């Protein structure tokens, strides 16, 4: 099911992808981190950029599935972000930015090692700024 969801986020029209995501979320059928890892695989092998998937996930989060979207984002980030010495893209920055937004909406907590590593890099890039924003959200105790 996670692989089918990943394909729908990349290949289906946004309305169809959002509808499918929301239906699965309502029934408890989104295996979040697995779906995120599958999404990374589909994008890595399909040559498509993350633009469609990001738009569909943002829309699904805005329509109430923010917890499920956060879980997908956590898996996707872990499987997709560049490691030390690898080149980042604008798509990576948009992914981290959406993840930071959704994490704040859902009150997500718990460090993601890939985000902690990015946040510890020298400042300067938008990716590092967004990683620091997400890292702070995930590691700052609730008020």
Image: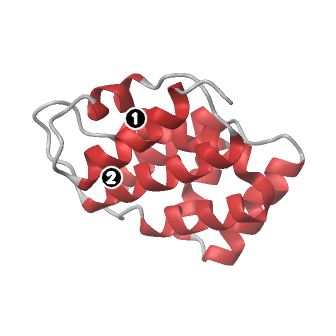
Q: Nearer the viewer, residue 117 or 42?
A: 117
Quadrant position of the N terminus in the picture: top right
Task: Left or right? Give the position of 128 relative to 23.
Answer: left
Please give the name of the residue rendered at 55% of the width and 57% of the height, measured from the top-left corner. Answer: 7
Mark number displayed over residue 127: none
Q: Nearer the viewer, residue 126 or 32?
A: 126
Identity of the residue furthest to the right in this view: 27
Q: Residues within 10 Å of mark 1 (few under 14, many from 20)?
A: some
Task: Left or right? Give the position of 83 relative to 72.
Answer: left
Please give the name of the residue rendered at 41% of the width and 61% of the height, measured from the top-left corner. Answer: 50
| Residue 37 in view in this figure | no
Quadrant position of the C terminus in the picture: top right
Measured from the top left, where is residue 115 in percent x and y?
A: 37, 32
Comparing labels 2 and 1, the label whose residue is closer to the camera:
2
Q: Residues within 10 Å of mark 2 (few under 14, many from 20)?
A: some
Please give the name of the residue rendered at 19% of the width and 33% of the height, measured from the top-left corner. Answer: 121
Q: Nearer the viewer, residue 26 or 3?
A: 26
3D distance between C-alphas at marks 2 and 1: 11 Å
Measured from the top left, where is residue 85 in percent x and y?
A: 10, 34
Measured from the top left, where is residue 55 in percent x and y?
A: 54, 69
Identity of the residue furthest to the left in this view: 85
* Residue at numbered disc 1: 79
SS type, badge 2: helix
143 in relation to 45, above or below: above
Please give the name of the residue rendered at 31% of the width and 47% of the height, measured from the top-left corner. Answer: 129
In primary-sequence order, the first of circles 2 and 1 is: 1
* Residue at numbered disc 2: 92
78 in relation to 94, above or below: above
């Amino acid at each position: 099911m996670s692989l089918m969801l990943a394909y729908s986020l990349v290949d289906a029209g946004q309305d169809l992808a959002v509808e499918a995501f929301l239906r699965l979320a309502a029934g408890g059928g989104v295996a979040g981190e697995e779906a995120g890892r599958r999404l990374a695989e589909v994008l890595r092998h399909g040559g498509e950029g993350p633009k469609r998937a990001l738009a569909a996930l943002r829309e699904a989060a805005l329509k109430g599935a923010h917890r499920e979207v956060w879980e997908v984002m956590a898996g996707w980030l872990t499987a997709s972000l560049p490691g030390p010495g690898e080149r980042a893209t604008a798509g990576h920055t948009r992914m981290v930015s959406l993840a930071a937004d959704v994490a704040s909406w859902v009150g997500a907590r718990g460090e993601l090692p890939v985000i902690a590593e990015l946040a510890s890099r020298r400042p300067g890039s938008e990716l590092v700024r967004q990683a620091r924003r997400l890292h702070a959200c995930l590691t700052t105790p609730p008020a």
